[in-house]
Image (cartoon, rainbow, N blue to C red):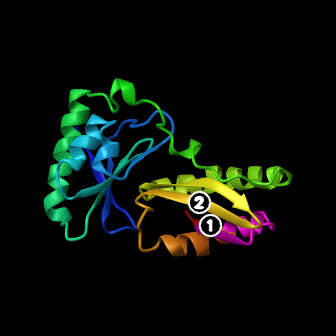
Amino acid sequence: MLIETETTPNPSTLKFLPGQVVMDAGTRDFADPEEAEASPLAEALFSLGDVEGVFFGRDFISVTIGAGGDWRDAKPQVLGVLLDHFAGGAPLFRASAHNGIDVAADEELPSDPEDADIVDQIKDLIDTRVRPAVARDGGDIVYRGFQKGTVFLAMHGACSGCPSSTATLKQGIEQLLKHYVPEVTDVRAV
């Protein structure tokens, strides 16, 4: 089995492509070892020591190492864990942990019912234009709300903590949304 790796805009994060579907639907972000208990794979990755974040996308896994970590040392260890997992056909989640797999469903801010059409346009643009592009970089950006002209987005995977995430938000996503949805005046990460 060959697992390809790709760099991401976040120097602390590498994207691993096992050549097969990782998540049938949705995504899952693990920010700490406690959250990782839901997945044998995420738990094994956190047990390596330098790992500070694990993100499952449709066909990739993004792994973030902490400050002071070195990918020259961590990469072979991560590849070993991934090879063992996928070659062994182990389950991605524990049987009791299937609740809440898709990060997009929770923590949405309340919005004005009069803005329903605007919110639908924003969500459509994020789902069709933004999320596929961000997934190529090993991350995900999820809609969280629209209030008084401001769009709130949650960043996951390689996007979380990425030095270029502010530029992506302001120069990329904000400009796209303002162009297609004139009611948008600002975009912020939550």
Locate residue 44 relative to residue 123 in the image: left or right: left
Task: Please report the bounds of the magenta region as a residue range.
Answer: 176-188
In this view, the residue in front, 130 or 69, is 69
Locate residue 166 relative to residue 61 in the image: left or right: right
Residue on which the image places disc 1? 173
Q: Distance between the residues labelled 2 and 1?
A: 10 Å
Dot 2 lies on which element? strand
Q: Which residue is drawn at 17% across and 58% down?
A: 74
Q: Residue furthest right?
A: 114
Observer-side mark, 2 or 1, equals 2
* Count of number-bearing discs: 2
Residue 62 falls inside the magenta stretch: no
Residue on which the image places disc 2? 153
Q: Residue at x 82, y 51 (%)?
A: 117
> From the viewer's perspective, is residue 59 above or below residue 171?
above
Residue 101 rendering spot, x and y as whole percentages = 46, 37
Locate residue 63 relative to residue 83 in the image: left or right: right
Residue 154 rendering spot, x and y as whole percentages = 54, 58
In this view, the residue in front, 166 or 8, is 166
Image quadrant assignment for residue 14 = bottom left
Picture disc at residue 39: none
Mark 2, other Cα within 10 Å: few <14 / some 14–19 / many ≥20: many
Q: Which residue is drawn at 57% across and 69% down?
A: 169
Q: Residue at x 71, y 52 (%)?
A: 110
N-term mark: 2 or 1: 2
Mark 2 vs 1: CB contact within 8 A? yes
In this view, the residue in front, 43 or 19, is 43
Say what amino acid the circle numbered 2 marks. Leu
